[in-house]
Image (tube, helix red, strand yellow):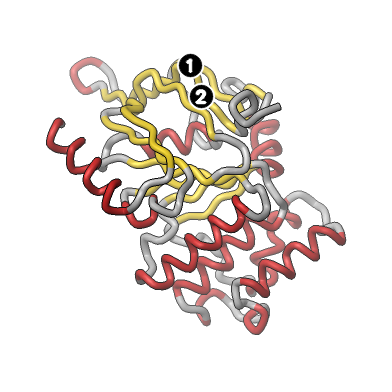
Amino acid sequence: MTETTAPVARVEAATKTYGSGAGRVAALDGVTIGIPAGRFTAIMGPSGSGKSTLMHVMAGLDSVTSGRVFLGDTEITALPDRELTLLRRRRVGFVFQSFNLVPTLDVQGNILLPFELDGRKPTPPQREWIDHLVESLGLGARLTHRPHELSGGQQQRVAIVRALATRPDLIFADEPTGNLDSRTGREVLAVLREAAHTYGQSIAMVTHDPVAASFADRIVFLADGRVVAERERSSAEEISAYMLGMEALA
């Protein structure tokens, strides 16, 4: 099957509203979009455009008011919590702006946490994959360090290894460079791009940063809870110009 027929996640006519009456807000307004397999997709838009809501809905962290949500071929729109948690644990990885590492665990413990939560140990190929990630991200000498002993960039690298460790179908990255300096941010983005291009990982990154989005293969623009445009890979300057145009029309 081609990536156009088999997105790793998709929403169909997804609507998410908060409040009622005059205070009703539509965070998503009839969105239909898919995340293609093996590609790095950036989801962009101004503050309040619905990009984080879209990520949360696609990842099964939040529910839609109406519409349908799929992870692979599995519809998760009304999946019971227990099944959804299991599915998410096995098929989705997360990288957050705030790293979300467990402070009492060392680097090794944080990386292996998804396996612990699932009651299993890494297989030999998974162990090899983790070792490769640790080495390529320069974390080999840090495995016994705890998060407070690491720089922000090192903490984010640990979060990326943890997200990639189980080889999930899809990785969601929510403003992953937001707390990093520009050089470290570029290194993190390069790792995400390599994960997609070299290892076939599917990555969806929410960002407002044109430089971050320029690392992606595809950019989806949201405004007022709707998808307003999609572009193939673009430069930071092209993305900035497009964003400025969107704001001028708002």
In the rendered image of this protein, does residue 64 appear above or below residue 167? above
- Quarter of the image where one finds residue 231: top left
Q: Which mark is residue 242?
A: none
Q: Which residue is mark 1?
A: 67
Q: Secondary structure at mark 1?
A: strand
Q: Is residue 117 visible?
A: yes
Amino acid tagged 2: Val
Q: Is residue 52 visible?
A: no
Label 2: how many residues lie within 10 Å, few (<14), some (14-19) or many (20+)?
Answer: many
- Quarter of the image where one finds residue 54: top left
Q: Which residue is mark 2?
A: 11
Q: Secondary structure at mark 2?
A: strand
Q: CA distance from mark 1 to mark 2?
A: 7 Å
Q: Position of residue 215 (x, y in %)?
A: 44, 54
Count of numbered labels shown in the rendering: 2
Residue drawn at point x = 57 percent, y = 60 percent: 160
Extreme-left residue of the structure: 248
Q: Position of residue 69 (x, y in %)?
A: 55, 24
Q: Position of residue 47 (x, y in %)?
A: 26, 42
Please give left or right for residue 242 compared with residue 94 in the image.
left
In the rendered image of this protein, does residue 241 appear above or below residue 227? below
In the rendered image of this protein, does residue 228 appear above or below residue 21? below
Residue drawn at point x = 55 percent, y = 64 percent: 101
| Residues at circles 1 and 2 in contact by the CB criterion of under 8 Å | yes
